């Protein structure tokens, strides 16, 4: 398996963890110092992001497309479009977003160190 294949696998694990609100996987995949910037500009820490999934989004459909992967040494950058349908705080939502994820590899393990996304119209 190439380094790029490992990065692709980590990204797919992240998407699955988002969809299922798998807090154990989110804990493993997020770096302790990760920063997540949401569409309205709010910046969350690892603990805050994981807490959102305790009572936050319930994603019923998650479709990733237009995926671009780049590897620079021990750093990976992923740009992708994600379409989602689900509920957040009990309210239905549907949207398409452009995500940029920055991953770092340490000892054969990829962890997300930064994420930012914007809503697409």
Image (cartoon, rainbow, N blue to C red):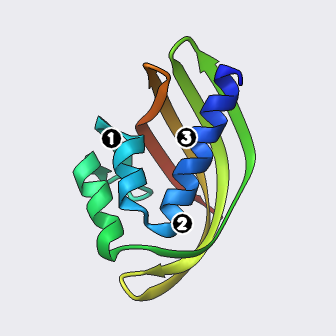
For mark 1, give the secondary structure.
strand
Nearer to us: label 3 or label 2: 2
User: Residue 97 shows which numbered tag?
Assistant: none
Residue 112 place in picture, x, y as percent = 44, 37
Q: Which residue is mark 2?
A: 19
* 66 on left or right of 106: right
Q: Quadrant of the C terminus?
A: bottom right
The vertical placement of 21 against 32, above or below, is below
Badge 3 crowding class, 10 Å Cα cut-off, few under 14, some 14 to 19, many 20 or more, is: some
Q: Residue at coordinates 30% horizontally, 71% vertically from top-left?
A: 54
Q: Residue at coordinates 28% horizontally, 47% vertically from top-left?
A: 46
Nearer to me, 100 or 16: 16
Nearer to me, 66 or 50: 50
Q: Which residue is mark 1?
A: 35
Name the N-terminal-most of marks 3 and 2.
2
Q: Residue at coordinates 49% horizontally, 32% vertically from top-left?
A: 102
- Compute the Cα span from label 3 to label 1: 12 Å
The vertical placement of 2 against 116, above or below, is above
Badge 1 crowding class, 10 Å Cα cut-off, few under 14, some 14 to 19, many 20 or more, is: many
Residue 115 place in picture, x, y as percent = 45, 42
For mark 3, give the secondary structure.
strand
The vertical placement of 84 against 102, above or below, is below
Nearer to me, 94 or 53: 53
Q: Which residue is mark 3?
A: 100
Nearer to us: label 2 or label 1: 2
Name the N-terminal-most of marks 2 and 1.
2
For mark 2, give the secondary structure.
helix
Residue furthest out toward the right: 66
Name the N-terminal-most of marks 3 and 1.
1
Q: Residue at coordinates 31% horizontally, 66% vertically from top-left?
A: 52
* Figure quadrant of residue 113: top left
- Compute the Cα span from label 3 to label 2: 17 Å
């Amino acid at each position: 398996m190439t380094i790029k294949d490992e990065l692709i696998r980590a990204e797919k694990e992240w998407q699955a963890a988002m969809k299922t609100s798998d807090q154990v996987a989110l804990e493993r995949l997020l770096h302790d110092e990760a920063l997540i910037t949401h569409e309205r500009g709010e910046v969350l820490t690892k603990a805050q992001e994981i807490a959102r999934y305790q009572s936050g989004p319930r994603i019923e459909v998650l479709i990733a497309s237009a995926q671009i992967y780049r590897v620079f040494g021990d750093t990976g950058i992923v740009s992708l479009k994600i379409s989602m349908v689900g509920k957040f705080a009990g309210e239905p939502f549907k949207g398409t977003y452009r995500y940029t994820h920055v991953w770092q590899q340490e000892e054969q393990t990829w962890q997300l160190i930064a994420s930012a996304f914007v809503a697409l119209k």
